[in-house]
Amino acid sequence: MSKPQNTLRHEFVSGFVAGSITSMIVHPFDLIKLRLQLNAATGQSWYVTVKSILSTSDANKLSQLYRGVSINVVGNSIAWALYFGLYRGFKDKLVQVNHGEVNPLLYLASGTLAGISTSVLTNPIWILKTRIMSQNKIGGDINYSTVRSSLRHVIGQHGWSLFKIGITPAILGVSQGGLYFMIYDTLKNHYKMQDKQTNKFSTSQVVSTSSISKMISMSLVYPLQLIKSNQQSIKASSSKEYQSMRRLIPYILKQNGIRGLYKGLLTNLLKAVPSTCITFYIYETVNNL
């Protein structure tokens, strides 16, 4: 197998492994973040949200914090594999077009193209994830009690339109990935230039670079992620306010002001920053094997 093909395969495998492990570790935070996003118009607090997750007759209440973990792991492992692989593929092509020169705009373009492709291909998975994780197993809609029943119900309800529910904010939100990689690769190259002898990217540098890149990029585009989650929720099937960005944004602003668009941001950063550090540490480690 040629070196470029080997490198590209490494990117897909690294992304898959990193996505699988990370999503398992931070799933409870992902669940809380999603519930907060879906209550953007109500102003429900973090405490009340966690209490509602744990308020079940199930003897093992903590199991509720891992509600939907299987679809989340599947979705994240596939998404990260696609994203890393496509990012490398687009970046290599753009470097060729740019006569071997690299710059922040090239990283931004590569990340954006990889993000759009990944968002379109994985959109149905995120709809299933949102609807399964939006309710407790006990007392919830029986149609969303398992991945199989959820898939059957959603396909029967939406058909091929499944690929376009929430796709507009999802595509607009890929700028987050583009911004992330623009910052990450720029800082990574800066660190490597400082240590030309070994050309190594140390663990502490991976952690600091990942943290800075994620906090900046996530904070800038978070409202789009919140809008996407609400458009893909169960409520969107029956409420017109949730079926388009044009209706949903004014509705949230009317009910809860500008802070409604940032509902769950802190929880998301608590989840996203450590998970991104873990993901990129695993990615860099596996990619260098």
Image (cartoon, rainbow, N blue to C red):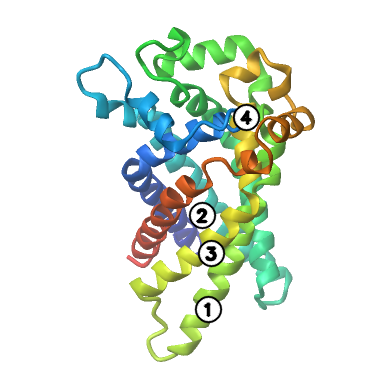
Q: Residue at x 30, y 17 (%)?
A: 56
Real-space Cα separation, disc 3 to disc 2, in angstroms: 16 Å
Task: Name the residue that disc number 4 marks.
Answer: 41
Q: Quadrant of residue 121?
A: top right
Give how far across and how far down residue 107 sits, in percent: 63, 66
Task: Name the residue that disc number 2 marks.
Answer: 84
> Which numbered dot is residue 20?
none
> Which numbered dot is residue 213?
3
> Which one is in front in this view, the residue at disc 2 or the one at disc 1?
1
Real-space Cα separation, disc 4 to disc 3, in angstroms: 29 Å
Give how far across and how far down residue 215 sits, in percent: 53, 60
Task: Name the residue that disc number 1 marks.
Answer: 189
Tell me the SS state at disc 4: loop
Left or right of 236: which side holds 48? left
Real-space Cα separation, disc 4 to disc 1, in angstroms: 42 Å
Callout 3, which amino acid? Ser
Give 80 or 138, whichever is nearer the viewer: 138
Callout 4, which amino acid? Ala
Tell me the SS state at disc 1: helix
Q: Residue at x 67, y 78 (%)?
A: 101
Q: Quadrant of residue 123?
A: top right
Real-space Cα separation, disc 2 to disc 4, in angstroms: 34 Å
Tell me the SS state at disc 3: helix
